[in-house]
Image (tube, helix red, strand yellow):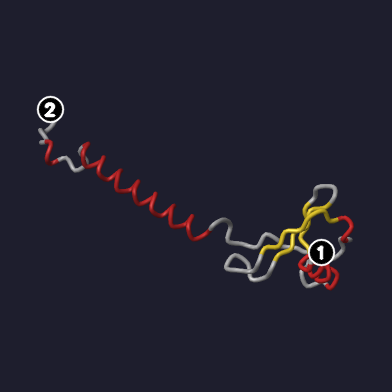
Amino acid sequence: MSFPAVSRASRPWSGSRLLLLGLLLLSAVVAIAGVEQEEGDGDLRCVCLKTTSRVHPKRITSLEVIKSGPHCSTAQLIATLRNGKKMCLDPQASLYKTVIRKLLEN
């Protein structure tokens, strides 16, 4: 049984063509990944899905405020408690509005 002779030029996926195709695909993937990273700067979603207004200010050791933006339509207030647990606070609660105001005054 003999196989028909196939010239190197008639083979559709020779080594050099595969290498060229691989390099083109790799550069496209790198370009897309770079654009996504520049646009996002992190997660494009709200950190706080549920908030509470039942944390006493004396239990809070630190506060982090994340402004509203393209990632989330509302400002987010994240409190670190004395036990190390992080809780999302309701920034519209009057108690926390007072705390934020006092922090900004100091």
Q: Is residue 28 above or below residue 67?
A: above
Q: Quadrant of the C terminus?
A: bottom right
Residue lying at 12% horizontally and 27% vertically, measured from the top left = 2
Residue lying at 82% horizontally and 68% vertically, measured from the top left = 102
Residue sitting nearer the eye, 76 or 19: 76
Residue lying at 11% horizontally and 33% vertically, measured from the top left = 4
Indicate the secondary structure of the residue bearing disc 1: loop
Q: Report the side of 104 relative to 10 (left or right).
A: right
Circle 2 is placed at which residue position? 2
Q: Is residue 97 above or below residue 58?
A: below
- Residue 35: horizontal and vertical position, in percent? 43, 57
Residue lying at 67% horizontally and 70% vertically, measured from the top left = 74
- Farthest residue to the top: give it: 1
Amino acid at dot 1: Thr
Q: Report the side of 38 relative to 42 (left or right).
A: left
Q: How far apart are the alpha carbons under marks 1 and 2? A: 79 Å
Question: Circles 1 and 2: CB distance less than 8 Å?
Answer: no
- Residue 51: horizontal and vertical position, in percent? 77, 64
Q: Nearer the viewer, mark 1 or mark 2?
A: 1
